[in-house]
Structure formats: C-alpha cells, structure tokens
Image (cartoon, rainbow, N blue to C red):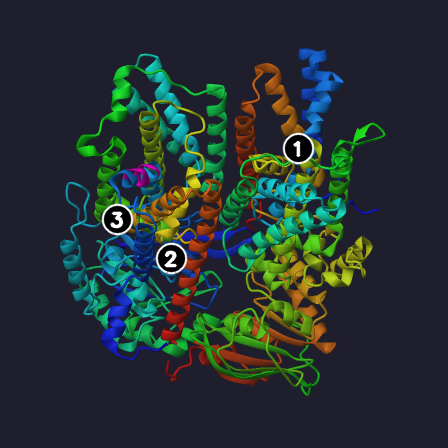
Amino acid sequence: MKNKNKHYAVNGRSITLLIIIAVIFVAMSLIKGELFYSSNNISTIFANLSYDLLLACGMTFVLILGGIDLSVGSVLAFTGIIVTMLLRGGMNVILALIIALLTGLACGCLNGVLISKFNIAPFIATLATMSILRGLSYVLTSGFFIVGLPDSYVSIARGYIFGISNKIIISLSIMIILGLLSTRHKAFKQMFFVGGNSDTAYFSGIASAKTKILGYGICGLLATVSGILMTSNFGMGQASFGTGFEMRAIAASVIGGASMAGGEGNFIGTALGVILVALVNNVFIMFNGSPNWSTAISGIMLLVAVALDLLRTKYKSKKGRK
Amino acid sequence: MKIKNPTIKKILNKINWHYLVLSVFILVIFIAMSVQSKHFMTLANMEILINNFIMEAIMALGMTMVIISGGSDISISGILPFTAITFAYMMLGNVPVALAAVAAIIVGGLIGLINNELRRLLNIHPMIVTMATQLTLKGLNLAITGGSVVAGFSEDFQKIGGFKPLGLSLAIWAYIVLAVFYVLFSRNNRLFLNVYFVGGNKDAATLSGMNAERVLRFVYVASGLLAGLAGVLSTTVYNSASYSFGQNVEMKVITAVAIGGTSMTHGGEGSICGTLLGTLFMALIYNAFVMSGISTYYQDVFTGSMLVVAVLLSEGVRAIKAKSALQAEA
Amino acid sequence: MSLLELKNISKSFGDNKVLTDISLSLEEGEIHSIIGENGAGKSTLMKIIGGIYTSDGGEILINGSQVHLHNPIEAYKAGIGIVHQELSVADNMTVAQNVFVNREPVNFLGFVDWKKLNANTEKEFKKIGIYIKPDMLVHNLSVGMQQIVEIVKVLSQEVKILILDEPTSALSDKETQNLFELLFKLRAQGTLIIFISHKLNEISQISDRVSVLRDGKYIGTLNKEEIDENRIISMMVGRELDNLYPHKAKSRNGQVVLKTEHLSRNGKFDDVSIEFKAGEITGIFGLVGAGRTEFAWSVFGADRIDGGKVFYEGNELNLKSPTQAIKNGIAYLTEDRKRLGLFLGMDVKDNAIASNVDAVTNKMGILDNSKIYKITQKYIDSLEIHPNNCEDSKIYNLSGGNQQKVLLSKWLAANPRVLIVDEPTRGVDVGAKSKIHNILRQLADSGMTIVMISSELPEILGLSDRVAVMCEGKLIDVMENDNLTEEYVLTKAFNKGGAK
C-alpha cells in the first residue's frame, strides 16, 4: 500500500501543532482551572472559529497559488451587507443567499483577473479591492446596522444539530470537502503546480490564468459563506464586520503549512492553525483581560509564522542546489 | 498614429505625458470646483484642503523613495498613532515637549529600522514585513491606551497647536521644508540616486560596487522618521493622541505616490515631483468630497479604485512603450 | 613572475564538475584569449577570478601573492574588472550615471557635480573613440551601445586585469574595431586583458596567446605565431569517443512531421527553414548565441513568431501557448530543468504527470491515485530511475541524472508525436546519459520525431541521424550524419567565411 497523499494526510507539521495545542490546553487548565475549561469559555473560543476557518481555507488556496488575498475581510462584510439588505427588503432567503454567493464569487474572480490577466501584484490588487469593498460597505449602509432579518435566516447560524452549532458543522464540512478535493481534483491539483513554479507550469502546458482565477474565486466564495454565517449569527449586517480578519487567516494558513512562496498548503494544518491562533488569543485574554491585544497578537504570530516559513524555504532551496 | 516630422517627434518624446495629463486633470478639477462653489477659492477652504491631507503629504515623500527602491511601507498607519501616543505619554510624564517630540520621531525611525532588519535577515518581502509590523503596532496602540484618548497636556503645549507663523501651521511649514529638501536631494544627492539603482536592479548595483543594503536601510528608516513626525504633528493639531489616528493613511499615501507616476511593480522609476502632483490631486479630490458633502465612506472606494487605475495605467503605458521599442529595434 | 597565476583551480556544482585542475599563467601587457565550446567552463573560470564564485581548492596569485576573492568588490580592489556577458546597466539612469555608478563626483552636500560627471564621462568615451551623449538615458540606447557603456564603466576604473566575456556579440564592426584599438592601448600600458570569445577571426586578430579549455580541463596554449584556426578547432574537439552510442536509424525515409519555413523571431533567429522526419533524431548544434533554444521556444508556442510558418503533419500551426502545443502532440524538454522543467518542491509522481493530468483523471476531474502510481512506476522502470520506490520522494532528493529522467518521463507521459529535447544530458552522470540516449533512440525507432538541441559534439555525432548547425540566429547547414567529424561540424558552427 503506497503512502497516503501527503497534502491531506496528517504530516509532521500537523502533529506538532496538535501537540502544541494539547500542551496549551493542559497548561491553561492547570493554571486557570475552571475558568479555562468551562464549557462557557471553550464555546467562546470555538464560536468565532467558524468564520476564521472558512477565511483561512480560502486563504490556503490563494497561498498555494503563490499569491495573497487581503480582501477577504471586506468581502465578508460586503456580501453580508448585500444579503441582509435584500432580506430586509423582503426577498426570499434562498434567492438572497444565491445572489450574495454570486457576488462574492465575482469579487474573488475580479481579484483573479486583475492578478493574472492584468499582471497586478496580488498584494496591491487585493489591497485595492479590500479598500473598495470596505468603502462600498460603509456607503451602502451609511454606517448603520442592517437589522430586521427573518427568523429562517437567523437560524442558519444559530441553530444546533446534535448539540453542535450549525456554524461549526457548516464550516468544518466545507473545509473537509475542499481539503479532500484539493489534492484529488485536477483543477485544485494544478494550483500546486502554478504556485510551485509558474514558469514551469507554463512550459508544462498548465493554464495559469484559469487556475488563478478559480483559486481567488473560491476564496471570495468562502469569504461570502463566512459573511452569511456572521450576519446570520448576529442577526444584522454591519460594515465593520471582518475588519482585520485577513491577518488571522494568513497567520493560520502559514502556521498550518502553507508557504508564502507558493506550491504548498495543508488543510488540516490550516484548521489546527486557526485553533491555535484562537487559543493563543484566549490565553492572552485570560491573563490580561483586555481583548485589545488580539490584533497585536495576530500581528506577532503572523510575523513569527512567516519568518519561520521563509527560513524553511531558504533551507530547502539550499538542499535542492545540485 | 504615425508622426513623420522629426522635430515634432523629438518634442513629443521629450514631453512627460504622465505629468502633463495629471496636471490637466488637476487644473480641470480646480476649475470645476471653483465654478461649483464660491466657497472653494476661499482662504478658509484652502486651509482645510491642505490640512486634511498634510500628514499624508509628508509621509508620501518617504514612501516615494521606499517604492522606488522596490518595496513598500504599509506600517506607517501603525507608526503614526504609535509615535503620537508615545509623544503624549512622555509629555504627561513631564518630559519637555521638544525632547519628547524628538524622541518620538526617533522611535518612528527605529521602527523603520526594525522593518528593514526583519526584511533583510528573514528575506521577507517588505510588503509582508511592514504589514505585520503595522498590525502589531495597531494592536499595541489599542492595548496601551485601552481604547481611550490620551489628553490633558500643559497649556503651553496647547499653544503650539495654534502657533502659525505667517498664517501657516507647523505641519505645513514642515512639509514645505521637507518637500524642498526631497526634491533637491532626490535629484542630486548620491545616496538618493543610488535608491534608483538599487530599485532598478539590486544585483547589478551590487556588482557595480554599491552597498545596496545601506541604501535600503536608509529608505525604511527615513519613512519611519517621517511617519513619526506626522504622529507628533497630529498630536499638536488635535491636542490629543489616539489609537485611531492615521486610519487608512497607508492607502492614501501609496495611491498618491502611484498616481504621481512612481511604479509599484518595477523599482527604480518615479520621482518626488510626480508625488507632489499626485498628492495635490488626492488633496483636491478629498476636498471635493468635503465640499459636496458626500459621505466619507466613499473615500475608501475612491482610493482603492484610484490605486487600481493608477497601476493599470502605468503598466499599460509601460507595455506600449516596450512594444514600440521592440518594433523600433527590429 | 606572472601578473595572474591560476593554480589547480577546480569547481563543482553539486556532482557536476565544471572545472578540473586548471593551471594557467597570465602576464601583464598581454591580450590572452580563452576559447572553448559551450560548457567548457570559460565563464565559470572568469567568475572565479572576478570573485563571484569561489574555487574548490587551488590558488589564485596576483604578482606572486595569493588572493582570496569573496565578492566582486574585493575583486575590484585587487584590480580585476569584468565586463560580463549579461549586461548590468541600469536602464532608468543616464549613461554618465551608469559609468560612474557610486563613484560620481560630489560636493559637501553629497550632491552630484553633474557638469564634472558628464565631462569625466566624455573623457572616458574619448579613449574608446566612440561618442555617446553622457546625459542620455541608457534605456534609449541599442543593446550594442549599452554594451559599450558597460565596457567603459569597467575601463573607467583602474584595472590591472580586464576580463571581457563575449564583449562583441552586440557590437557593429566599427565599434568592435574601436574596442580593439582601446585594448591595444591598454595592453601598451601593461594591462592584462583576458578575452573570451567564440569568434575565431577576432581571436586571431588581437590575441598574443590563446588558451583552449575543453570539458572543464585546460588543453593547451598557443603563442601568436602558432595561432591557426584549424589547430584551435582540433584542440577544442580532440577527445576519444569512448562512449558507446546506440545504432542510427535504420531508414531515413520517414514522413516529414514538423516543418518550418523561413521562421524568424526578431533579434533571436532569422529565416530558419528545416524539416523533421518521423523515426529520426535530428541534432541541432551551435555555439553561444546560435538561437537554437529561441527557435525551439517559438516552435513550441512559448514565444511568438515574427515571420515564417510552422507546419505540423501538413497543416499550418499557429500556436499561442505551450498548452496548445502539447495538445497537438508536440513536447519540449527545457534546457534548464531546475528553473523551467521540474517542480522542485513537489514529489516525483506529481512531476511525472504534470503535463498530462487528464490521463489520470476521471470524467469528474478527480485524480485516480492508482493510475498516477502506475504511470510513474512505468517510467521509473523503463528509464531505470533510482531509487525504485521514489514516487513520493521530493524531486530535489534525486541526483541530477535521475531528475532529468523524471523530466523526460513527464514529456513521455504526454504522448507526443514530436519530442524536442534541449540539452538532454546536461549535468547528468555517465550512466544516466547513456540510458537517456538509448531511450531517445528507442522512441525514434517507434516512430517518434526527435529533435535534439545539444552543445556536446560527441552526443550530436553519436546520436543524430542528421545534424543541423545554427550560428548567430541563422541555419547554416543540415547534413546527413554519414562520416561527419567534430572538426567539420564545429567549423560550420563558427560559420567561417560567413558574414554576421
């Protein structure tokens, strides 16, 4: 029986992350006791996980392609506003959802087109769309919250199946499906090639542009699902939703094994990365009490993750010099 | 359109089309706004126009050199509030104003140094490094101030905010001095000129005997210093320091530089003069927003779109130039 | 005591030995040319002298004392200046700025004294007898002019040892003569000039001595009176054919599968008309700048065509991308396997299927793992790739020869009718080399059309049924490989008597 596919199978990195998470868990339980392992605290940690899970999943695809998507937080907010505005206007829930998803897909594809056909650097293109979408979100709402959503919509995120929040079920299932597909489906597999070495991919006959547009499109779609879950959960649409979420998504993906250089990505790792980032945040809050540190922590974790990743790439390229 | 006459061709080649078109745009906007509203050409409005964009204008000078060197500095929107807060706390701690100001500006420079060292040691693209620094700083700003505004300075300090020699605020004077300095030095000073070399082809610059790392260190420290200055000036203007200072300022600054013709994608191209034009353009547009009462939320949409347009245009122009150059060679 | 003495200089990149035990003495006040085929090691040797590489063992002595050069700046300090083959000018700056980069005359403010800078630049250009406006943007200069700027840049510094690596490739005849005049002047001043070129006529014209390198080894030096083009050629090729090559094609009456008519690509190659037949291996030989790889790129759709046509199985082909080429059955194994051929970070099986992912997917687009392993194993077995169970190994863990075999597998897996291979055995050990040769012959026997671009004369003569020779973008000749000698082919590659 040949080795299992390394990209999805639990690899060294994932095991390391699992151990780190377990150690933190145990340590915190010993130090802070009931405060930490109470179902209240645990569910708080996992509550916000679902949004990050989806964003990080999309970010992993983009990182595999060797790019980056800074606009995910803005897409989350923007599509959230679209769907809530439509719902407030009385539109049928399914229809509103479809329109929102298509919008998010379009936003992602726009990024992909700017990057592959117009040759704009991913950082700049997504920085710009991040700005535009965030601005549009505020423009559409004039800063007000959008409320008055139908119960059927709100129950999407707030519901429970077998005691587990719908949010977790939806985000985990999507992540598992996409993670499985990532190495088993041709379209996704090609992302590894394009991200690994886009020139070689070109000479090997792989359609780079199409692959990139697909990757960014999926990222936008996943950000939309995240936006739907968030607006559903809070029962409102808000232009400030998702601000700063892109950093956590990048940090989680890179911690999980995606490389900023492209060609690598592991979805189990990304999921564990999301959990780790959430855990570290929670640890700080437990000790410091102020949630204001979370942005700073994300920044530091991102820096550390990216630095370690680049050191690893440097080491590998030295090995490959034959 | 094929031009045959050699003299006309010569003249056409010498004109900097980018600046010409940009200047025309600026003129058109100027005229349109004067016609639209009689309040536009007033001294009061001119003050508002300038003061609303003066911090960005100052930082755009440093950003231009960073982008020419082939990188970018996203962290300025974190440095500005950070140095403002540092400055504020120092004064509250009874440090003399002048000393505190200098110290805060130096802190800005130190952060710029950190940006560069991280970039160098870890071999990370400057965009990523400065993005991470920005995030960290923003978080620190929020955490240190607990979300509240830092205020309550001495009366003497409050007078500084109103100090307006010849009717122009301190910030404007600072900008004038810096702008003149940057224009002169970027065209004549060897270190500044070396930035163009390093941005154009870092390896060739090194092969030619240049210390490329020293040049890069210079641009990032300078950018940090200018952001630090902007932070200190902001405190004098608002008589307080807050974590929310400088929101989105990196977008506005980068866009102003990009509109001015400095290439985001190819290092070694751009100029301070272009940035001056780009800054003027952005300041005008933002003033137009204020005057017409359009909600501030449109600003982000505008800035983002302008960035895309500016980059697309400069890439398009580059492609056309390259194509016609090749055909000429054939 | 010699000005520059090289003692036992060797250099390997991984298990690829590029220079073996080179010892050479070079004197002041001489123009010393170095010649050799592609891959003979000339550029590497120069880069070692110039501080860009360090040698594995051996010594470099300047005026009798040993020097250790770790970077170009140290080399400059030691009085060594190189004009590289690849230009290192900044095209966004002026001529004067490029010539005096980082050495501009400045005042106390650090401001450049533009007048002085331009005047100094004009002085330097006067020495070479060429005039270029100092304040012109280098961007607006032709490549030839840019090369002159590069040369003047190096010359404007006090160099005792001047190395020029293919300096005349973009120069006109007049500019070349001007350069030579300058070199003579420098020689009179005592400068040692090391001149690398593949142009025999120039070497004959200016050299005091000529040294020949072959396969990374020093072969010999000829003094001025001994310089004879034929002798040089025979020193370049004189090797024993100890490699056994597979048989040639049994018949050469195959169908013409691929044909080009007057194919041109501005600045790269011109008017190439050639036919490639099924069942045959056509070798394409040439020296630096011959344009062979560029020709292959255009045929493969990786680069555009500026003139002429390509015909494939009788129909005109208009390829816009390699994707289309592969769909049509044309494969191209790139010259640089690390940069353009393999996905270094991925494993062997992923590399093997990269060009034909469709073959291993079902209708829904899902990859069939068992098919992937089957195909990979098939090529591991038939190409004898070591280790045998390497499907999941990262490709960077394999030796050069095995990497090349995996690269070949990728293209074979795409089921091409035409296979173009560019330097198929570069950086490959003897065993793998032989295996690849045998595979290529087997493929030809089974009806495939093989085009082999190579700089190794033994390989060209050992394997090809027909040999095409290109020189500076032109197709010089296509010959049946009956009784061809290395000297004859190399002479064609120099295009002696042919104009530029």
Q: Where is residue B123 shown, x and y percent of the image? A: 47, 40
Majority secondary structure of magenta residues: helix
Gap between marks 2 and 1 measured at Cα: 52 Å
Q: Where is residue B205 shown, x and y percent of the image? A: 34, 50
Residue at 72% across / 77% down in the picture?
Answer: C445
Residue at which label 1 appears: A274
The 10 Å Cα crowd at callout 3, few under 14, some 14 to 19, many 20 or more, is: some
Residue at which label 3 appears: C102
Q: Where is residue A187 shown, x and y percent of the image? A: 70, 56
Chain under callout 3: C
Gap between marks 3 and 2 measured at Cα: 24 Å
Residue at which label 2 appears: C46
Q: Which residues are magenta?
A: B47-52
* Marks 3,2: beta carbons within 8 A: no
Residue at 80% across / 55% down in the picture?
Answer: C368
What is the count of numbered marks? 3
In the displayed structure, B10 sits above or below C261; it is above
- Of tags 1 and 3, the one toward the viewer is 1
Identify which residue, C307 or B266, lies in the foreground.
B266
Dot placed on the residue nearer the N-terminal end, 3 or 2:
2
User: Dividing the image into 4 quarters, which one contains the C terminus of chain C?
Assistant: bottom left
- Kind of element beneath mark 3: loop
The 10 Å Cα crowd at callout 1, few under 14, some 14 to 19, many 20 or more, is: many
Q: Where is residue A157 shown, x and y percent of the image? A: 74, 34
- Kind of element beneath mark 2: helix
As shown in the figure, which amino acid type bears the numbered disc 3?
Answer: Asn
